[in-house]
Image: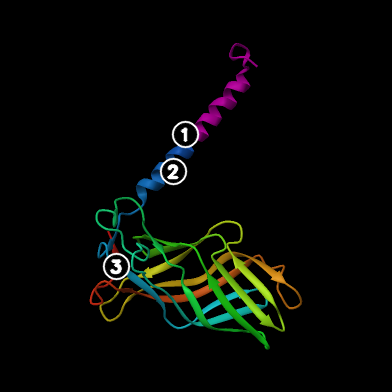
C-alpha cells in the first residue's frame, strides 16, 4: 500500500502506533529522571561482604544451609571497591561495583545421607541505589554458582544456567554500632538441576536467603554507606 492509497483506517493505525511509541519513550525518560541520586562512600575504598548468620538455598525438596560465606578484595583487582570519585556518585541512578565471587563453606543439606559443596566463579556485581529503602541489586554471572551433592542423591544445581541472574536485596547503612548490611529475603534465582534419584530435576528456580555485613577493608574504622 503506497502513501497515496492509505485509507483513513490505516492513518488511524499509524497515528496510534506513533502515540504509543512516544508514550513509551516518555515513560522511560520519566523513570530515568525519577531515579534518586546515589553516592557510595568512602570513594575508592575496598570492602568485604561477610555472612552474618546462615545462608539458605532451597531448590525443590533440597535445602542447603551454609554457615560461612564471604567476598573479599584481592590485591591488584578493582573488584570489591567503591568507585573512585566522581564515579562513586550518580545524579539519577545506581552506583555499581564488581565483586569477587563469594565463597560458601560449612554447608549441610536437609536430606539425610547427602553431603554438599558450593563452587562459585566469574565476576559478580552489586548495584547500589539510594532510596527508601536503599537497594543493592546483585548479579550472578552465567553459571557462577554451582551446588553439588553426593551420597544418597548425586545432584548438580547450577544457578543462572543460561544467562546472568539478577535479584534485589535491601541495603542498611551502619548505625555506628556495627557495619552496614545487605539482606537477601526470598530472592528467586533461575537454576538447572541435574542428577538421578532424589534430585529435584523439575525445579527451575531456587530461593536464597542471607544477611551480609559490609565492612571497609581500606580503613576498618570507616563505614561503607549509601546516600544521596
Would you say 123 lies left or right of 62 here? Answer: left
Q: x, y (%) of residue 124? A: 46, 63
Residue at the image point whose x is 73% and y is 78% from the top: 198
Task: Indicate the quadrant containing the C terminus: top left, top right, bottom left or bottom right.
Answer: bottom left
- Crowd around label 3: few <14 · some 14–19 · many ≥20 (10 Å): many
Q: Nearer the viewer, residue 37 or 50?
A: 50
Tell me: residue 116, above or below residue 4: below
Label 1 or label 3, whichever comes before in sequence order: 1
Q: Main secondary structure of the magenta part?
A: helix
**Residue ID for mark 3:** 225
The colour scheme applied to this rendered structure is rainbow
CA separation in Å, label 1 and label 2: 10 Å
Would you say 120 lies left or right of 215 here? Answer: right
> Which numbered marker is on residue 22?
1
CA separation in Å, label 1 and label 3: 38 Å
Residue at the image point whose x is 36% and y is 63% from the top: 77
Q: Nearer the viewer, residue 19 or 178?
A: 178
- Crowd around label 1: few <14 · some 14–19 · many ≥20 (10 Å): few
Q: Nearer the viewer, residue 196 or 37?
A: 196
The reply to whether callout 1 and callout 2 are in contact (CB within 8 Å) is: no
Considering the numbered disc 3 on the image, is that residue within a helix, a strand or a loop?
A: strand
Q: Quadrant of residue 52?
A: bottom left
Tell me: residue 63, above or below residue 126: below
Q: Is residue 111 magenta?
A: no
> Which numbered marker is on residue 28?
2
Considering the numbered disc 2 on the image, is that residue within a helix, a strand or a loop?
A: helix
Would you say 65 lies left or right of 40 here? Answer: right
Tell me: residue 137, above or below residue 178: above
The magenta segment is: 1-22
Q: x, y (%) of residue 115? A: 63, 84
Amino acid at each position: 500500500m503506497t502513501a497515496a492509497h492509505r485509507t483513513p483506517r490505516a492513518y488511524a493505525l499509524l497515528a496510534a502506533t506513533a502515540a504509543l511509541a512516544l508514550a513509551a519513550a516518555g515513560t522511560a525518560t520519566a523513570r530515568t529522571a525519577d531515579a534518586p541520586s546515589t553516592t557510595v562512600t568512602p570513594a575508592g575504598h575496598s570492602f568485604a561482604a561477610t555472612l552474618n548468620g546462615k545462608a539458605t538455598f532451597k531448590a525443590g525438596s533440597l535445602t542447603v544451609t551454609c554457615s560461612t560465606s564471604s567476598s573479599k578484595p584481592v590485591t591488584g583487582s578493582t573488584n570489591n571497591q567503591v568507585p573512585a570519585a566522581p564515579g562513586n556518585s550518580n545524579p539519577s541512578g545506581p552506583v555499581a561495583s564488581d565483586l569477587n565471587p563469594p565463597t560458601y563453606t560449612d554447608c549441610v543439606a536437609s536430606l539425610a545421607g547427602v553431603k554438599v559443596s558450593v563452587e562459585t566463579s566469574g565476576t559478580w556485581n552489586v548495584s547500589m541505589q539510594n532510596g527508601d529503602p536503599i537497594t543493592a541489586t546483585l548479579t550472578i554471572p552465567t553459571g557462577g554458582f554451582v551446588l553439588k551433592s553426593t551420597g544418597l542423591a548425586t545432584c548438580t544445581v547450577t544457578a543462572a544456567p543460561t544467562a546472568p541472574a539478577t535479584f534485589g536485596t535491601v541495603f542498611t547503612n551502619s548505625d555506628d554500632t556495627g557495619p552496614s548490611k545487605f539482606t537477601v529475603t526470598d530472592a528467586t534465582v533461575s537454576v538447572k538441576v541435574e542428577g538421578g534419584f532424589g534430585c529435584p530435576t523439575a525445579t527451575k528456580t531456587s530461593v536464597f536467603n542471607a544477611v551480609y555485613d559490609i565492612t571497609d577493608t581500606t580503613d576498618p574504622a570507616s563505614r561503607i554507606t549509601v546516600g544521596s
